[in-house]
Amino acid sequence: MSDFDLKVREEDGVIVLNTNGYLNNFGGEAIASVCLQKISEGKRKFLVNLEKTEMVNSIGASILIEVIEELQGVNGKIGYCNLAPIVEKTFNIMGISKYAKIHTNEEEGLADLSS
Amino acid sequence: MATENPKVELTLPVLQDMELVATKTAEVVANRMGLDEMKTAEISMALIEACINAFEHSKSNNNVYIHYIIDGDTLIIKVGDSGVGFDQEVVEIPNIDEKLKSDRKRGWGIKLMKELMDTVEFESTAGGTTVTMTKTKK
C-alpha cells in the first residue's frame, strides 16, 4: 500500500492541507475526513497543497467532489495549489477546477481564500 | 540489440496500489522511446485508470495482464482481465454538474483514458475485457 500523509494547519482563517503521496481512495478519504470535521467545527475555507502528490487516481479525485458538494451546502470554498501538470489536467478533465480554484502556490491560494 | 516491435509483459495481482507498478514500467518504456514528460505522465494516469477498472470491474480475483508494445513512434498498451466484461453502450459519460447532485461520484476512468491517450478501444466479452490504448511520440 502506498504511503499518504496529510499535514493540517490553519492560517488566516483558511484550513491548509499539505498532502504527501499518491492520492488514491485512502488519500481522498483522509482529505475528506479532515474537511468534514473542520466544516462541522464551522470552518468554511480550505486550501489543499498538492506539491508532494505527483499522481492521483479518479477514485481519490471523486472523493474530492464530495467535499465540494459539502462545501456548497454551507457556502464554503476550497482551492488547490502546487499541482503537477498531470494532476491539473486530470482536475480539468473531471471539471473539479470549475468548482475549486487552482492556484500556482500556497501564497496565492491563501491570499485569494482569506480575502 | 534492436528487436522489431519490442514488447514488455507484466502480470499484476489484484492488490491495492498495484497500478503503480504498471506506471513504473510505463515510465521506463516511454523514456526508452524518448516520449516527453507530459506524455509519459498522461500514459501513467491512463494506465492507472485502466488497471483500476480491471481490478474493480472485472469481478474477478485473477491477475491483470499488461503488454507494452513499441511500434515505431507509437506505444501500444494492452490491459487485460479475465472478468465478466462490460457493455460500453451503457457506460455514461460523467459530468461534474451531475456528479455533484448524484450519490455516485465515481465513474471517470474511461473518460480520463480517452482524454489522455490518442486512441482507446475496448474488447469485452463474458470471458474478460482488454483495453488497447496508444500514444504516439509526434
Image (cartoon, rainbow, N blue to C red):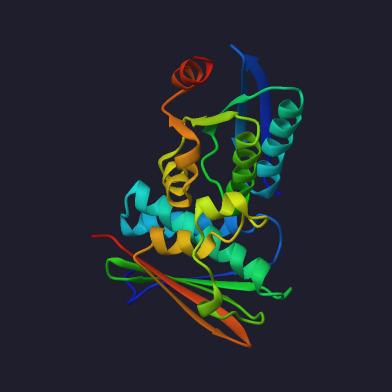
Image: A16 above or below B124: above
Task: Return the x and y of residue A40 as percentages of the image width and height.
Answer: 76, 28
In front: B5, or A107? A107
Residue located 62% across and 72% down the image? B64
Left-right relation of B87 to A38? left
Residue located 43% across and 58% down the image? B43
Task: Return the x and y of residue B86 as percentages of the image width and height.
Answer: 59, 79
Left-right relation of A61 to B34? right
- Outermost residue to the left: B138
Left-right relation of A109 to A6? left
Residue A49 appearing in the image: no
Instruction: Please identify the quarter of the rendering in which residue A12 is found.
Output: top right
Residue B31 appearing in the image: yes
Residue located 58% across and 47% down the image? A61
Task: Return the x and y of residue A91 as percentages of the image width and height.
Answer: 47, 45
Image: B22 above or below B36: below
- Outermost residue to the bottom: B126
- Quarter of the picture containing the C terminus of chain B is bottom left
Task: Return the x and y of residue B65 as percentages of the image width and height.
Answer: 58, 73
Instruction: Please identify the quarter of the rendering in which residue B135 is found.
Output: bottom left
- Quarter of the picture containing the N terminus of chain B is bottom left
